[in-house]
Structure formats: C-alpha cells, structure tokens
Amino acid sequence: MDREALAAFLVSRRHRISPADVGLPLGARRRTPGLRREEVAQLAAMSVDYLSRLEQRRGPQPSSEMLVALARALRLTADERDYLFHVAGHSAPDRLAVADHVSPALLRVLDRLSDTPAMILSALDEPLVQNDAARALFGDASQLTGWERSGIYRWFASPETTRGIYPPEHHAQRSRALAATLRAAYGSMGPRSRAGALARELAGISEEFRELWDAHVVAQRFEDHEVLVHPEVGEIEVDCQALFTEDASQVLLVITAPPRTGAAQKLELVAVLGTQTAS
C-alpha cells in the first residue's frame, strides 16, 4: 500500500469533481474546488473520518469493496480505478469479470435524472446504481448478493417471487428477452466468463431457460414499450430508453411515460410511496 500516492490521488480526484457532476446542490460558498470530504463519504457510503484518515496518509488499508465504492463516488475511469487498486495494495479487478465499476459517462447522465425511474445495469442485468424513483418502482437491489443480483437469474430461479412486476401474458416474451440478453453477453465475454457461469447455473435449475438457451436467440436491447405492475397503483404503461456504453457492457435504462397521462401520474405516485416507505 502506497499511502502517499493513495492520499494524493484521492484528494486530486475529489477536487476534480463539482457537486453538479454528481447531482448535488452547490450549497453555500465553497473555499476549495470540487467535492467536500463529507460529500464523497456520503456518495461512497463511508464515514467522513475514514476518508479523512486515508487522505491524511494514516488510514488502514481499504478493502476491495471500499475501493469499488470510492471509484464509483469519484467517477473514476477504468484506468483510474485500476490505479486506485494498485496504490492501495490490491490487484486490479479483471475488467471482463467485474460488474461493480460503473461507467462515469452513464453516471453523469443518471445524476441528472431525478424525476423518472432510471438505473444502470450490467450485461447480466445486475442493477449497479438506481435512483430513488427506480428503487420505488423495482425495489432496492443494493442488498442483493451473488447471483441474486442478476435479474436474469432471479427471473428463472425464483419465478414465483420475481415475475409479479410484469403481467402474466408478458412473461413468455420477457423470458425470451432475458435469455437472448445472456446469450449476447456470453458471446462477447466467452464461456469461461461470469456470463458462461450464469448460463450453466440456470441450465441446471430451469427447464424453461434450457429450452430458450438452446434456441440460440441473441439480442442486446430492451423493449421500447412495456407494462409494469405495481402492487399499490396497478398496471403502468411505460416507455423504455436504453443507453449503452461503447463496449455494451453496461446500459442506462430510463423509464418514462407521456406527460399529463394517467401513466405519468402513476409513476409520480410510485415515487411518493417509495419516499414514504424509505422514511
């Protein structure tokens, strides 16, 4: 662990980012450029004291999980993320295997979307970041671990508990779309990748998945129009916009409804209900 290099890097990256870059208000007059320590700590879900000690060259060696959180909070590129791991005394994660590092470009867009559900997904349909409206609509995915993080896995492994957000008549179409999404990830990542491991896992527990997987349908897109079901407001007809990274390893999914429609009102109500539940 190179304490001096780690401290200098964290300070330099923190000073590079403005509050607007991460969706925070400017607030009172600032004496220094960039984000305050407490703002980075909030974004990384760590204590201000812990971050202060790292920046003052006296903190303990951060864990890999903590470095992932810092890389996301500081909007680091993949190269910067690797450097952060190295100076902290860790090996950099395999870029094809890791699903935790979020594209800074997608994060910048997500930070500006506060009035409609939006989230960033990995190639295996793992929610990497959700805004408040997305958590209210789809549920909070931050506590999920292992394969449970993947919406593809949950769809086929636990259909009785995960498919209620779509009308029954849409389930078959959704199954085909998810199997095709995994097939596309498998093609780009290879059989020894996490995509290959997930396919083998699902083939061992779901006959429906095995049949769809053997059909070799490949697709890497989302439906333009979907019907979602919320337990308190009922069915909501929404439009889906997907923005992929250049290597198609991550996607920003934005859920909208035409203004001044019943669907738009339902989305607003879901956001309010989600805020009340969080409180």
Image: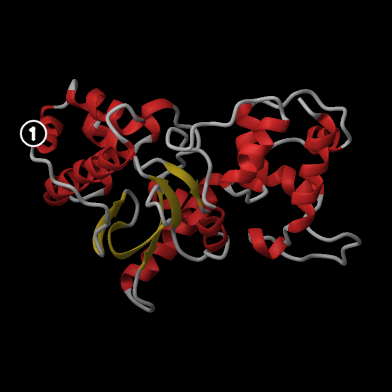
| Residue 198 occupies quadrant | top left
Give 22 or 257, whichever is nearer the viewer: 22
**Residue at horizontal 39%, vertical 69%?**
265
| Residue 215 occupies quadrant | top left
Give 196 or 31, whichever is nearer the viewer: 196
| Residue 54 in the image, given as x and y percentages of width and height | 81, 33
Tell me the quadrant of the picture where the N terminus can be found. Answer: top right
| Residue 276 in the image, given as x and y percentages of width and height | 53, 51
**Residue at horizontal 46%, vertical 64%?**
116
Q: What type is the residue that disc 1 sits on?
A: Glu
Considering the numbered disc 1 on the image, is that residue within a helix, a strand or a loop?
A: helix
Q: Residues within 10 Å of mark 1 (few under 14, many from 20)?
A: few
| Residue 118 in the image, given as x and y percentages of width and height | 45, 57
Is residue 82 found left or right of 251 in the rendered image? right
| Residue 251 in the image, given as x and y percentages of width and height | 40, 53
| Residue 197 occupies quadrant | top left
**Residue at horizontal 70%, vertical 45%?**
42
Is residue 25 found left or right of 177 in the rendered image? right
User: Is 71 situated above or below 91?
Assistant: below
> Residue at the top extreme?
204
Count all numbered tags in the image, as a single digit.
1
Is residue 51 found left or right of 95 in the rendered image? right
Give 216 or 241, whichever is nearer the viewer: 216
Type of colouring: secondary structure
User: Is 168 situated above or below 95?
Assistant: below
> Residue at the bottom extreme?
260
Residue identifier under label 1: 211
User: Is 48 situated above or below 26?
Assistant: above
